[in-house]
Image (cartoon, coloured by chain):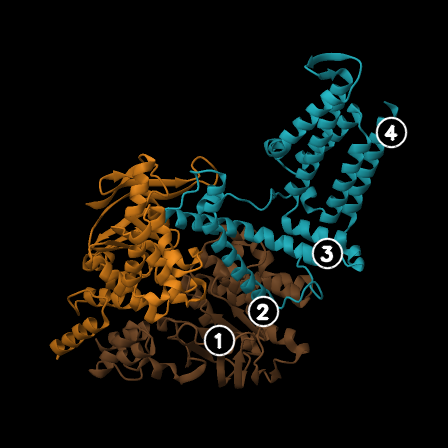
Amino acid sequence: MAPVSAMLPRWRLYSWSNNLMSSGTTLYLKGAEFQYPDNEKKVLKGIDLEIRAGEWIALLGPNGSGKSTLLKLFNALLLPSQGCCFIDGINTNETKSVALIRSKVSIVFQNPEDQIVASVVEEDTAFGPENLGLRSDEIKIRVKEALISVGLWEKRKHAVSSLSGGQKQRLALAGVFAIRPGSLLLDEAMSMLDPASRKSFLDLIKREHSSGCTIVQVTHRLDEILNSDRTVVITDGQISWQGKTENFLSISENELKDMGFAKPPVAVLKEELVKSGIIPGSTRSDIGEIRKKLCLLQ
Amino acid sequence: MSLIKGVTLGQYIPADSFIHKLDPRCKLLITVLSMILIFISGSFPAMAMWASLIIFTAKRSQIPAKALIKSAKPILVLIIFTSLLNIFFTGGSNIIFSIGPLKASVEGTVTALRMGLRLYLLVLFTALLTFTTSPSELSDGLEAAFGPLTRFGFPAHEVAMMMTIALRFIPTLFEETERIINAQVSRGADFVSGGLIKRAKAYIPVLIPLFVLVFKRADTLASAMEARCYRGGKGRVRMYPLTWGSAENKALTAFVVFSAAVISLNRCM
Amino acid sequence: MSLTVKKLSFTYNPGLPTEAKALQNVSFNAEKGEILSIVGHTGSGKSTLAMHLNGLLVPQSGEVIVDGLKTDSEPNNLKKIRQCVGLVFQYPEQQIFAETVRDEISFGPYNWGKRGEALEERVFEAMDLIGLDNSFASANPFLLSGGEKRRVAIASVLASEPGYLVLDEPTAGLDFTGVCELTLLLRSMSEKGICVIHITHDLELALNISDRILIISEGTVTAYGTPSEISEMLSNINVKGLILPDILSLSYELKKTGSIENLTSDPYRLAEQIKAAKMRCR
């Protein structure tokens, strides 16, 4: 697997030219509730949430708190049973806009096996654009861009079954990139990957975000959210904490543990060093930045 | 796990040949026509002609002879069985030998040979189709071929999509079945000893988890397909649209001329 | 009494074009009462290794010996070995098939010939070990939460009273609370004298919970030792596909420049050392 950095200059040539300049979508929930038809218990109980274009939101919460359901509201896979959901100002319950909404908001699920449709790499990547009814040469361009950006262009004719887990998840990402959405929803998309694949996947998300895409990321692991702007914690169908990610990470280790989260070691280190005045309080919880600050001091 | 990494996509053998590039509809049409014609033209010289067409096509599409011969292996038993039936039950006066009440006649043997060869040629023709056409091209071709039937309610797109998904999930389900079997064997499950009923029962702990998994998988896959803007066949296009051009016309013409020659040869004999 | 792997090699589809070497010359030893973590990236061969430990795969060369019994010997031994080495696959909740938790957990011991009261005893002991109270016994396992399902699945392996417990990626997909519960469980198992073999791709987790660590890469053992020995070794070798924990790699850099003395993956200890170094500078 080629390192992502090695692919960057080439990728730039195929940058998302017109689309990404128009940047990310805004996602908006107003008093959203959700309840499955045959179940009395409400999964979501009145969520108000506004996500600005280009923002990176980390959506946290224990298993079964309703995070995944919330994501499905954003691309009209589910409709709120009360309240409403708007994507770039379009209400998701307008049936005729569903296609438009889904071309603006894409989702990557946990298990790559569940979302790859075709047996050959490039055919799967083309699935989304094919459904959009694009011209054949446009589809080919998008497929090429998407596969180059995730580092699978060389494997475009390969069988999906010959890919590793990490490669499969990057293929799932390519399938979504080819739709050129303005926002990307990640439903524990990295939880089945090993650390190396996770890192290269996260690098791809960072790049998407830096080119203007809105990111909503559901995860259990706080070491994956270090790059996010805002953290939203959902407990039992309600927002129980919300604020800047840096503020969330500076909650004490024990308190976080009570909330059900492991404080990332990097955040612990930063806090300890800030406490004793070795690095400035403005340092982000990022190993690269801590390293830089320490070097400057020496 | 890697045990079944060898499972390929159908029998497709990728190569850069004129025949690989032909529109799948053209190849389907030729295959179906040749199947019918092989049954009509039953003489040995005609069959020799068909065989030579198969050899020529295989050569041109770089299909190794070994693969071609192997492709008929699974139904060789069937061919031999029907041939035996023919030998003994055709009837005829020139008896070669007899086993009890069973009598093998010259006529019977000739019929048997003819039938066996016919079946064999049919298998080789379909094998050539699957060797030179990828599964997705094949399902595209079928979808287009059955397209006219949608007017009568035939779900051509759905059938083609089902074929695509089935092919995609065969390797995955293989892996999953293997893992569940291993997990149950580790807990002491025994699939080999005991009578038929006991052994069948032993598979319950494999089948139930597999069903649960498949349904869950289908559920997420449906969501994922919808999320990727899938709305059924309506408005859906293909990255490589099927194109019927001069190559297809030439291939079809050549085939028709060839068939005409074979049929007239068949008549004369 | 121990589990010994000697010069184990294994190749998938030998002689075919799809031939793939999975293990080459792997040797190690696991003792009762310890937690041994086997760390490797996806495709490193760790799952193939796991399947060798209870005889699901038989060595092509080399040997696996469990309490003196070789896995490639007669079927009778194999039965004993499978009873003795419990194997918990990745996402073990996917193996659940029974209508009640009791039936699910009794599957193993029933297969090994336990009946009646002895069987019942095993089931409740296993549930107790894993922290499921008795009220769960008649529950439908398919209706439990993800974490509970996983515990039922692990209990169903523990019910056979294995001396060795092999778990493949047991924390995958669990939230933090689930991970904590599971690591506590592994610790209590090892304290009861069971040998816990924990297979994972998470080096950070392995460094925190194991007595010994075996690092495997592309089918060969690249490092083997206690967590602190492993920390030391990894500063000198580069293992393909293995991502070092951030704190550990920072401590390598600082040690190289002479700022700190001890390698660590614990952020508190690293912070303390940095503080001390700063004091010295002043």
Q: Which residue is mark 2?
A: B227
Q: Residues within 10 Å of mark 3 (few under 14, many from 20)?
A: many
Report how far apart the C-alphas of labels 1 and 4 lie in the structure: 70 Å
Q: Earlier in the sequence, mark 2 or mark 4?
A: 2
Q: Which one of the lettered chains is coloured cyan?
A: B
Quick one: label 4, few (<14), some, or many (20+) residues within 10 Å? few
Q: Quadrant of the C terminus of chain B?
A: top right
Please identify, in this view, whether the residue under mark 2 or under mark 4 is nearer the observer.
2
With respect to residue A297, does B36 lie above or below? above
Residue that carries the numbered disc 1 in the rendered image:
A215
* Residue beneath the point at 56% across and 84% down: A82
Q: Tell which of B133 and C68 is nearer to you.
A: C68
Q: Position of residue C211 (x, y in %)?
A: 20, 57
- The kind of residue tagged 3 is Ala
Q: Callout 3: residue from which chain?
A: B
The chain drawn brown is chain what? A
Q: Write down the residue under mark 4.
A: B264
Label 4 marks a residue whose chain is B
In the structure shown, which secondary structural element does the residue marked by tag 3 occupy? Answer: helix
